[in-house]
Image (cartoon, grey):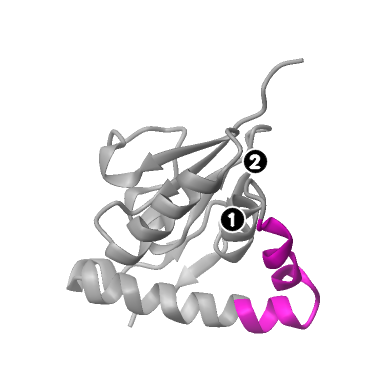
Amino acid sequence: MEPRYDTLFYDGQCPLCAREIRTLRKLQRGNLIFADIHEQRDGSTSLPSHEALLRRLHMMTWTGEWVTGLPANVRAWSHTPFGFLFKPLLWPGIFQMASRLYGIWADKRYERKYACAVCAATPIPDSSGHIIKEPH
């Protein structure tokens, strides 16, 4: 049977993100690959834009599907013995609230660290084409 690896794209320049990745690296069971966004080649046609990767957590599953935001975080933690603690975040009702809070946090984190006038004027789609950030 062929191994099945998910790849988690993370912001290695974000102290909070880096701390969570260190914890995931220690706890994961071996089927999770970590990719620092800042070490990826710009212009790769197989990846979302650099900015989209920085705005939301992205994971490419072993099947080639992109998972973003809170579901990507829950899936990353499912590679650890503590994954069951994160599953309720995907339950109806809880998911809507938790996803909204994640989005608010992710937007503020991005704007504090990376936002610029040019970026703020451009709508940002996620990997499925939905707008995740409207221009200011």
* Residue located farthest toward the right when viewing the structure as drawn: 92
Horizontally, is 72 left or right of 25 in the view?
A: right
Picture coordinates of residue 90, whole percent (x, y):
73, 68
Looking at this view, is 132 or 81 the one in front? 81
Disc tally is 2
User: Dot 2 corresponds to which residue?
Assistant: 65
* Residue located farthest toward the left when viewing the structure as drawn: 117
Crowd tier of the residue under label 1, counting other residues whose Cα lies within 10 Å: few below 14, some 14–19, many 20 or above = many
Q: Which residues are magenta?
A: 82-98
Q: Secondary structure at mark 2?
A: loop
Q: Amino acid at mark 2?
A: Glu
Q: Secondary structure at mark 1?
A: helix
User: Dot 1 corresponds to which residue?
Assistant: 72
Position of the C terminus, as image quadrant, is bottom left
Tell me which label, 2 or 1, sits earlier in the chain.
2
Position of the N terminus, as image quadrant, is top right
Looking at this view, is 26 or 121 the one in front? 26
Residue 134: tell me if it is visible: no
* Residue located farthest toward the top when viewing the structure as drawn: 1
Quadrant hosting residue 108: bottom left
Q: Is residue 96 above or below residue 29?
A: below
For the residues labelled 2 and 1, the Cα–Cα distance comes to 11 Å
Residue 12: tell me if it is visible: yes
Crowd tier of the residue under label 2, counting other residues whose Cα lies within 10 Å: few below 14, some 14–19, many 20 or above = few
Looking at the image, which residue is at 54% across and 47% down? 27
Q: Amino acid at mark 1?
A: Ala
